[in-house]
C-alpha cells in the first residue's frame, strides 16, 4: 500500500489516528503523520481511516510492483 497525507489539506482532526492507531499518529503540531512501518502494517482499518478524514487529506493506493 501507498499512503499519502496532503499536509496542505490536513486540519489535524485526528480521525485517522483514532481509527487506525497502528498506522497513523499526530505530529507535534497536531497534524497527521505515518508511524514507522505504517504503510506495511496491513491494517484492515487503513482505508476506513482515510475515509474518516473530514477533509480528504489521506489517499491510499495499491503499490505497483
Image: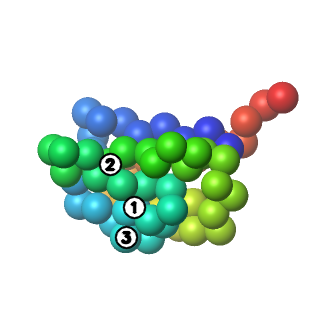
Instruction: Give the Cα distance between marks 2 and 1.
Output: 7 Å
Mark 2 falls on what kind of element?
A: strand
Q: Residue at x 28, y 62 (%)?
A: 14
Residue 36 at least partly seen? yes
Q: Which residue is mark 3?
A: 18
Location of residue 10 by image quarter: top left
Q: Residues within 10 Å of mark 2 (few under 14, many from 20)?
A: many
Q: Nearer the viewer, residue 63 or 20?
A: 20
Could you say where residue 54 lies in the image, as x and y percent from the top left? Answer: 31, 60
Q: Which residue is mark 1?
A: 16
If you read the primary sequence from the N terminus, does the residue marked by circle 2 or circle 3 appear first? 3
Mark 1 falls on what kind of element?
A: helix
Q: Residue at x 51, y 43 (%)?
A: 36
Q: Which residue is mark 2?
A: 32
Q: Residues within 10 Å of mark 1 (few under 14, many from 20)?
A: many
Q: Residue at x 51, y 62 (%)?
A: 22
Q: Nearer the viewer, residue 24 or 36?
A: 36
If you read the primary sequence from the N terminus, does the residue marked by circle 2 or circle 1 appear first? 1
Amino acid at each position: 500500500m501507498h499512503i499519502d497525507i496532503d499536509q496542505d489539506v490536513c486540519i489535524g482532526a485526528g480521525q485517522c489516528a483514532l481509527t487506525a492507531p497502528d498506522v497513523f499518529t499526530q505530529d507535534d503540531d497536531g497534524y497527521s503523520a505515518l508511524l514507522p512501518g505504517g504503510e506495511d502494517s496491513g491494517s484492515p482499518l487503513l482505508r476506513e481511516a482515510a475515509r474518516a478524514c473530514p477533509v480528504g487529506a489521506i489517499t491510499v493506493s495499491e503499490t505497483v510492483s
